[in-house]
Structures are given as structure tokens and as C-alpha cells.
Image (cartoon, rainbow, N blue to C red):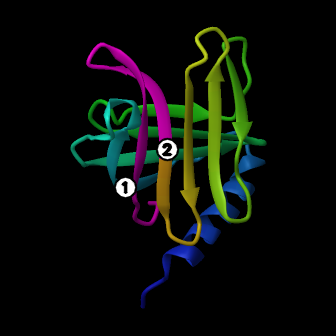
Amino acid sequence: MSMNFPRLLQAVLLCLAVFASSAFAQTFKMPCEVEGVIPAMDDLKLKPQKVVIEIQSLGNNMFFKMNGPEPYVLITNSLTTEEFNGKNLTTAKEMGAFRKHKVTGAESEIRIAQATVVVTAFTDTTYLGKKVRINITGPCSAPR
């Protein structure tokens, strides 16, 4: 018996909502195969990699961490602090978060589409000595 990804992602979102009311946030891990592109460097394509996205929810705040080889390491969350402005981007069609560093202006974002279970993300970083934005996309598997 096989579940389709949209239903599984809906179930995960429901679980996140239930766990948000508890004191401890459970971490969901979602394996993805992603590829990065740097538009500022003539659409330079980076080597595709396997990453794992960790997803947590605590209250109204969403926390995402993309774990993989550089430059596919990315942290974003909806929490606003002294250093960062955050925003929860979760809707009925996708889940995600955005954050911006208040001093440097560096931004990062992760969104996961519910219907297709595809991640789209970006991060402002230094690549080969140049400050650039890396756009990241790729399909993901069901969270575990």
C-alpha cells in the first residue's frame, strides 16, 4: 500500500500543528536531491547533491535546516531576534520560512510545495570570494 506525497505532506503539516502546542518540537527529516544555480555568475550550475532538510515547529515559528555539503548548508526560520527578521511562509499550498540579517541584509528562504514535494530555496553567501545568491531546487522524499 502506497501513500502519495501530497497526502503524506498534509499529514506531516497536521503533526507539526499538533506538536507545536507541546514544549518539545519534534524534528522531521526530509531527504532531497538538489541543484544550485548562481544567476550572478552567468547561471553557473553547481554540482547536484543529496541533502536532508530538518523541519521543526514551535508555536507559530517554523525552523528549517538544510544539511549537505557546502554550499548546500542553509538555516532559516521565522523567528525575529536582535540579529534577524524572520517570517513564516506556511500556507495551505506550501510550508516555509524566510529570514534576513538586520545588519548585512543577507537573506535566506526555504519553501516546500505540498503538491509536488519540491524544495525551492535561496541563500546569500560568499562563493569563490564573491557575494552571491544561490538558488536551490529539487525533489524531496517523504519526511521520516
Residue 2 image position (x, y, % from top left) = 43, 86
Image quadrant in which the C terminus is located: bottom left
Q: Quadrant of residue 23?
A: top right
* Residue 31 circle label: 1
Identity of the residue drawn at 24% across and 48% down: 48
Residue 128 among those drawn in magenta: yes
Q: Residue furthest top?
A: 103
Identity of the residue drawn at 64% across and 36% down: 98
Vertical comparison of 43 with 4: above or below = above
Residue 49 image position (x, y, % from top left) = 25, 47
Residue 127 image position (x, y, % from top left) = 31, 22
Is residue 118 shown left or right of residue 76? left
Q: Is residue 39 visible?
A: yes
Residue 93 among those drawn in magenta: no
Magenta span main SS: strand
Question: Disc 1 marks which amino acid?
Answer: Pro
Q: Helix or strand or loop: what does disc 2 sit on? A: strand
- The earlier-in-sequence mark between 2 and 1 is 1
Q: Helix or strand or loop: what does disc 1 sit on? A: strand
Q: Residue furthest front?
A: 42
Identity of the residue drawn at 62% across and 70% down: 11
Query: Within 10 Å of the Cα at label 1, are there few (<14), some (14-19), or many (20+) other Cα atoms?
Result: some
Q: Quadrant of residue 69?
A: top left
Vertical comparison of 16 with 115: above or below = above
Q: Quadrant of residue 25?
A: top right
Q: Is residue 25 visible?
A: no
Is residue 124 shown left or right of residue 7? left
Which contiguous range is marked in magenta? 121-144
Question: Disc 2 marks which amino acid?
Answer: Ala
Q: Which residue is mark 2?
A: 121
